Structures are given as structure tokens and as C-alpha cells.
Image (cartoon, grey):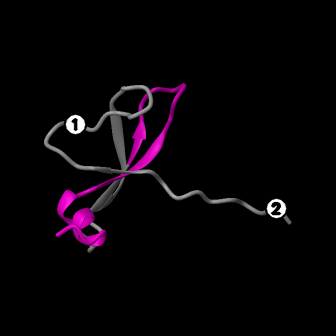
Amino acid sequence: MRQFKIKPLETFLMNDQPFTCPHCGSRCEQIADFYHTNAKTFIQECLNKKCKFICNEEEDEYFLKLWGVI
């Protein structure tokens, strides 16, 4: 039986600009929307075919509360 190793996604904070890939700088596409949940997060995928980086984009207030900053 094959076992899959799942790595947690890197997390970045939302801002008022369109999200771009932190690795190559290309635009990203939202592939999952969990903003309606308590997590207030989006899953983003880089549109660059050579990169295809996937990450998590969170609302800053939720992130700061999660880590006890506010």
C-alpha cells in the first residue's frame, strides 16, 4: 500500500492587492474558498505552469488572533 506524505501549506496574509506567487511572482488563482468559515482563508495556486506553487492565504485579523498577537 502506498502512503502519501501531506505537507502543511505555507500561509500568507491577505491584502488589498491581487495575490501573487511568493516564489516566482506570477499571478495566482483561487482554487478553494473557505472565507465563509471561521478559518477565513483561500487556497491559491500559481498560474505559472512551471511553478504551480499552492499556498494558503488568510485574513490578517484571524491570523493575528490565532497566534495571540491581538
Q: Is residue 26 above or below residue 42?
A: above
Residue sitting at x 69%, y 59%: 5
Between 6 and 60, the one lying in front of the other is: 60
| Magenta-colored span | 44-70
Residue ID for mark 2:
2
Taking the image as shown, residue 56 lies to the left or right of residue 17, namely: right
Three-letter code, disc 2: Arg
Whether residue 55 appears in magenta in the rendering, the answer is yes
Residue sitting at x 38%, y 34%: 21
Residue sitting at x 17%, y 63%: 61
Residue sitting at x 49%, y 38%: 53
Disc number for residue 18: 1
Question: Marks 1/2: CA distance?
Answer: 38 Å
SS of the residue under disc 2: loop
The x and y percentages for residue 69 are 22, 67
SS of the residue under disc 1: loop
The x and y percentages for residue 16 are 13, 42
Three-letter code, disc 1: Pro
Image-quadrant location for residue 25: top left
The x and y percentages for residue 23 are 44, 31
The x and y percentages for residue 54 are 47, 44
